[in-house]
Image: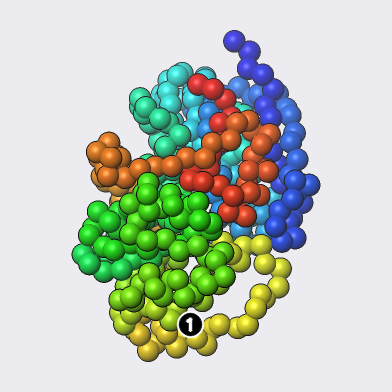
Amino acid sequence: MREPANRRIVLAARPQGLPTLQDFDMVTAPVTPPGPGEVLLRTLYLSLDPYMRNLMDPVGPGYAPPVAIGATMVGGTVSRVVASRHPGFAEGDLVLANAGWQDHALSDGSDLVPLGDLAQPSLALGGLGMPGFTAHVGLLDIGAPLPGETVVVAAATGAVGSVVGQVAKIRGARVVGIAGGSGKCRVAVEELGFDACVDHRDAHFAERLAAACPQGIDVYFENVGGAVLDAVLPHLNVGARVPVCGFIAHYNDTAPQGPDRRPELLAAVLQKRIRMQGFIILDHYGPRFDAFRREMGEWVAAGRVKLREDRVEGLEQAPSAFIGLLQGRNAGKLVVRVHAD
């Protein structure tokens, strides 16, 4: 069957602050058939993640090159093999891929992970994929929570934070979430099982966080920065661990925001002997990903970890959904269903 034309969403301009719809463009071209050793993929689900904002700047973050003007926006996908000239993949195979923001893509197979008969394939982009893996490695390797310790996680109902909190509970910690809005805080406590959740939009946020952490904070999973980090810093205990996987509050900054907090941060790191460690999840796939998928799959199957998904319909909705993600409008892992399977 002849495949339709391929729609691609490309980077049209470098954003100045928060991206706008004018920073993206949709272009259409014929679908290219696979050459020797290649497979043709059809995108079923596209993952939208905060790191993509960093790749829109002219200088990349170091672990990945920036997206060129006119190039397809990058992103993880769940894809179906629709044609194959690769000995390791057959037509109809379901795979985890890096097809980006487009209907179809070619691959030489080196970046594909077979998914088999996964009941809900989109979870391979969330709790059973990169965001869940980020939570698992950051919390358990760097945070290393002990039973009874207090773990605080920002963006508590997001793709990473929601898993961090639930895994910390499995490890016996007391978990306090930070989220934007009372509705998200209710989800964190009533659905995800957090012990408490504090709304960072509350006028008395700092006081409410202090009240929720009477014994201080032993582990703070950092993925936001900004005013949230400012509020957390005074309550970190001696020997606290701070895994850092992101700082979304600053991704759209075009100039320094607010007072310089670096002296306070460095003083806390020194005086309280805090271990603050950044990590890039790409470094951990080889030795760890298979074991993570097995363990997380068991927790999800047993109901010990609940995975929330915010699904958007249609590739054309990706730019507006991505802008909403950067503003905290999503409720769970944000995915775009590009094509029905």
Looking at the rendering, which quadrant does residue 170 occupy?
bottom left
Q: Residue at x 35, y 85 (%)?
A: 272
Q: Is residue 53 positioned above or below 291 on the image?
A: below
Going by the numbered disc 1, the residue's amino acid type is Leu
Q: Residue 312 in the image: state x and y as whole percent.
A: 58, 35
* Residue 22 seen by the camera: yes
Q: Residue 209 in the image: state x and y as whole percent.
A: 43, 71
Q: Residue at x 56, y 82 (%)?
A: 261
Q: Secondary structure at mark 1?
A: helix
Q: Is residue 11 left or right of residue 212?
A: right
- Name the residue tied to disc 1: 265
Q: How many marks?
A: 1
Q: Residue 102 in the image: state x and y as whole percent.
A: 63, 33
Looking at the rendering, which quadrant does residue 72 occupy?
top right
Q: Is residue 245 positioned above or below 218 on the image?
A: above
Closer to us: 141 or 201: 201
* Residue 143 seen by the camera: no
**Residue extending furthest toward the top:** 1
Q: Residue at x 30, y 76 (%)?
A: 215
Is the N terminus in the top left, top right, bottom left or bottom right quadrant?
A: top right
Q: Is residue 155 positioned above or below 219 on the image?
A: above
Q: Residue at x 61, y 54 (%)?
A: 326
Q: How is the image coloured?
A: rainbow
Tell me the crowding category of disc 1: few under 14, some 14 to 19, or many 20 or more residues within 10 angstroms, Cα based: some
